[in-house]
Amino acid sequence: MTQPQTEPEAASTALLSGWITRKELADALGVTVDTLGRWEARRFGPPCVRAGRTVLYRRRAVQDWLAAQEMPRARMAGGRK
């Protein structure tokens, strides 16, 4: 059985509702947390924010970054009509 959230926990959850952790993003993308750390060091990947030792990603920024990574389809030689 779950216990009801206390007010501070509920406020914290609401405050961070548009954000995900590095671990959550790594799991969603199928990469390691270390890979995301390397991307950050190389200024590649979605933008992030550091709050102490916690690294957070805005969900919308991740979606925008993913859309920017989309590559157009390559045309086949001899192409179809």
Image: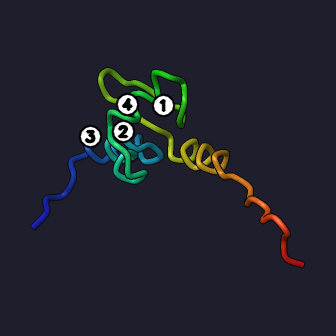
Q: Nearer the viewer, mark 3 or mark 2?
A: 2
**Secondary structure of residue under mark 3:** helix
Category of crowding for the residue at label 1, using alpha-carbon neighbours closer than 10 angstroms: few (below 14), some (14–19), many (at least 20): some
Category of crowding for the residue at label 3, using alpha-carbon neighbours closer than 10 angstroms: few (below 14), some (14–19), many (at least 20): few
Q: Type of residue at label 2? A: Arg
Q: CA distance from mark 4 to mark 2?
A: 6 Å
Q: Is residue 57 above or below residue 73?
A: above
Q: Nearer the viewer, mark 3 or mark 4?
A: 4
Q: Are marks 2 and 1 in contact (CB under 8 Å)?
A: yes
Category of crowding for the residue at label 2, using alpha-carbon neighbours closer than 10 angstroms: few (below 14), some (14–19), many (at least 20): some
Q: Along the polypeptide, which appears first: circle 3 or circle 2?
A: 3
Q: CA distance from mark 2 to mark 1?
A: 9 Å
Q: How is the image coloured?
A: rainbow
Q: Type of residue at label 1? A: Cys
Point 41% across, 41% down: residue: 15
The answer to whether residue 23 is left or right of residue 63 is left
Q: Quadrant of residue 47?
A: top right
Q: In the rendered image, which residue does mark 1 sit on?
A: 48
